[in-house]
Amino acid sequence: MPSDTKSSAGAGELALNALTALEPRVDAFHTAVATAEEEIRTFVNHGRGVSEYRTEQMLVELGPFALGRVDPEAFAGLLPDTDVITSEDEGVLVHAEQILADFAVDHDFHHVVVEAGGDLRDAVKDALEQVGRVFGASRAVELARAGLFDPDQHNGYLSGLPFRKWNRAERQLAPPLVVEVEAEDLLPAGLGEFLDGLVKIVLVVQGPTTPAPLARLITPGTYILQTADTADLAAFARSPNPGVALLFDAERPEQARFVHDPEAGATSWQRLTVSHMPEQPDVGRGRRAPTWLEEFTHLQALAKKPALAVAAGNGAEAPEPGEPVTPADQLAAYLLSQVELEG
């Protein structure tokens, strides 16, 4: 785990609560790993049993005359049998089985603590590469079972598979990560490269942050959440999309709280639900706007309903999908959006 410092009590408790909320995804990963580990162990034991049986069978078939003259084990090795594995392949299988056995019962890798001043993106990258040992071991098993494992080419599979080399099925099985990070080290933009398959990352941070640090990660296919309520993580865990969630330790007026759910609509304003939008700060005339202000305005732009949608909500008839919108339609929609029509 990439950390030299202990997490604070508050952040540690939040992280545990987050892991509890992600339990269905955690259980799915460990069940798959345990099943694969059991399958490998059964295969190895079967191969050993077949090998021992074939040697005994050769002794019977060769008869008393061969005793002391013919090596039955070597003789049996001359006969092809797809159920028998070589000692080299068996070594690969046993090594891979041990890797899977360790991951099947170990839950610590789900929890990552970024050391103060550390790099959030690198910490997540390293954590996923450790998880890649599971997928690398699985690939090594397939090669060894087929008799195709080449130590010079494939030994790297047993030490860790970088996320960029995971295939689609592996990314769909990705276990969730809960990452504790200091507020000053919260630079989540670099996490975009990991948002594929069913990768779920929860960032736990204590103290105030910028208003919308996750706004840059909002894309049509990603589930993005900023919240102070761990109950919101249940929908995050169920989503069939990759995502990042930011879990605050408290609700502060300067921090936006929102959810971007790819399944909620076709346009950004339909997918984005903002439960709290802070007031835009006054940076003063002549002063250069801080970089985080761009994230804030980006979130505002994504959440803003178009005039036609507002007008439709006030009783105006919205155009059919694909129907061209004329300037007159736009003007009428804008005027209707400015008028209170109730009563």
Image (cartoon, rainbow, N blue to C red):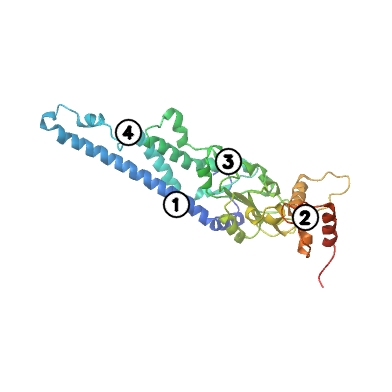
The mark found on residue 292 in the picture is none
User: Which of 16 and 319 lies nearest the eye of the viewer?
Assistant: 319
Could you say whether the residue bearing mark 4 is in a helix, strand or loop?
A: helix
The residues bearing labels 2 and 3 have C-alpha atoms spaced at a distance of 38 Å
- Nearest-to-viewer mark from 1 and 2: 2
Q: Is residue 68 above or below residue 338?
A: above
Write down the residue under mark 4. Answer: 87
Q: How many marks?
A: 4
Q: Are marks 4 and 2 in contact (CB under 8 Å)?
A: no
The mark found on residue 306 in the picture is 2
Write down the residue under mark 3. Answer: 125
User: Mark 3 Cα within 10 Å, few/some/many (few <14, many 20+)?
Assistant: some
Q: Residue at the top extreme?
A: 69
Apparent side of residue 193 relative to residue 311 in the rendered image (left or right): left
Q: Are marks 4 and 1 in contact (CB under 8 Å)?
A: no
Q: Are marks 3 and 1 in contact (CB under 8 Å)?
A: no
Camera sees residue 92: yes
